[in-house]
Amino acid sequence: MEIFDYSGPRFDVYREDAASEPLVLDDGPWPAPRADGPVEARLRIPGSKSRTNRELVLSALAREASILRRPLHARDTDLMVTALTQLGTTSDHLDEGGRFGDDLEIVPGTLTGGVSIDCGLAGTVMRFVPPLAALALGPVAFDGDESARRRPMGTTVEALTALGVDVRDDHRGRLPFSLYGTGRVQGGKVRIDASASSQFVSGLLLSAPRFRRGLTVRHTGEHLPSVPHIDMTLEALQGRGVAAERVDERTWHVPASPIAGAEITIEPDLSNAEPFLVAAIVAGGSVSIEDWPERTTQVGAQLVPILERFGATFERTDDGALVCSVERGIVEGHEVRGIDLDLGEAGELAPNLAALCALCSTPSRLTGIGHLRGHETDRLAALATELTKVGAEVTEFDDGLEIVPGELHGAEWSAYEDHRMATSGAIVGLAVDGVTIDDIGSTGKTLPQFPELWAELLRPGGEEPDEPGTISLADFGV
Ligand SMILES: O=C(O)C1=C[C@@H](OP(=O)(O)O)[C@@H](O)[C@H](O)C1
Ligand SMILES: C=C(OP(=O)(O)O)C(=O)O
């Protein structure tokens, strides 16, 4: 079939409080600000990427309209909205979302193909949309960024093929590929190897209520990373009246079922809170994150027990904020010991933790994260290269990293178009003079406001900016 020529949305680094006025940072390197002493900040972090993109997919498949309150507006979610719109969904901005952008109303429509989907570098778009596209009538082509073409896709392709979907897989389990939707998928049972990504499971489960016979997915591979993300998928389905369930450790079942419309407030992205919480350990002081959910399936919740091991203490305020306090920071000469940590469930937390480990006084081992080689970039190689550049000694294993701290020094830190590599460089820069990040704009994948929030974090004594709601570009050396 024809691969349609479609150039997807470009993204800008922009300020949500002036959403129509993109703030385009210089292409040049971003000087990571140093922290000289304790920080004191209370921050509101935009909505969860993982939850927003699940709710967007379910809203497109639902039998009636849905409203998403405080959804994330970032490159990954913009790509999802665009993909679903191309396939027949309508989305309207409700203009009530406050500082981080509008609430969204999603009205499902008849799913029709004849389109090319730009997945950008978003794992959730490339793994969640193809099963939905199989329910559309007509051809749908998928492509993404150059780096996205290196991410594993074979399990999605094989699963859909096994379910009788006509998939043209010219690049053997990589983007670009295309499928020919017939408007229906029989469903039933499918066995897949999801050891490279939990998103293969989640993607199938999300569209499964609309398959004729629902779907039972069984994972046959050795490892299964990021299990809490599958729990989040089940929770999202259940929230729409679908009796989705985990049958056993490697099997999930979703019955054929209507998907209800819903009004859902998206929790803040706890994984995107990570660099700010880590900053409290590096600088000392306290960082509060507003609206930290009491119960959540987000892996970011694991930051509390993990960062306690680095000396942080946590408490909740009556108004729902999580306060992370650290008596003396690393920059004040406090020595924090490294740790051994299995991050198999929470791989997306690994890059920022690796940066923190490099600032500790003793070696650390992060394991269970071999699948990070298929993330935005090969994160194990990228972390090893960049941490070595600034003076740490790093050994890569098949499933992780050993990080031996050293005398650290400034360098140009490469982000590899990876939001979490960029924020990891910013963490190192808090404690090390002369760190610059080659592409801070890559944070736009899930947190376009990162430079702005980082400046807010580092503003002395919680000082108000010159004009309320604005920050000086000089803060970024722009
Ligand atoms: O389903 C999701 O929303 C995600 C699942 C995880 O992917 P992997 O299982 O590939 O690690 C996670 O790392 C990613 O950031 C988001
Ligand atoms: C792995 C990640 O993203 P993606 O959803 O693109 O897989 C991540 O955000 O850490």
Image: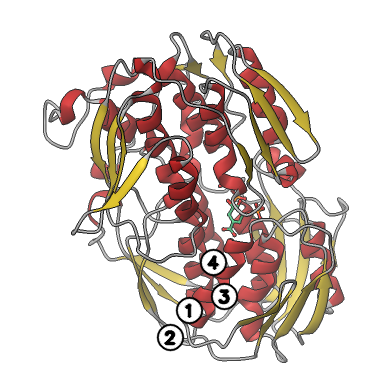
Of callouts 4 and 1, the N-terminal one: 4
Which residue does the numbered mark 3 point to in the structure image?
234
Of callouts 4 and 2, the N-terminal one: 2
Of callouts 2 and 3, the N-terminal one: 2
Q: Is residue 105 above or below residue 405?
A: below
Which residue does the numbered mark 2 point to in the structure image?
64
Residue 348's x, y, as percent?
58, 46
Which residue does the numbered mark 4 point to in the structure image?
84
Tag 1: amino acid: Pro
Which residue does the numbered mark 1 point to in the structure image?
108
Report the Cα–Cα distance between label 4 and label 3: 21 Å
Residue 376's x, y, as percent?
64, 41
The crowd level at tag 3 (other Cα within 10 Å; few <14, some 14-19, many 20+) is many
Q: Quadrant of residue 188?
A: bottom right
* Element marked by disc 4: helix
Residue shown at the point (71%, 91%) measured from the top left: 212
* Element marked by disc 3: helix
Residue shown at the point (56%, 81%) measured from the top left: 110
Report the Cα–Cα distance between label 3 and label 1: 21 Å
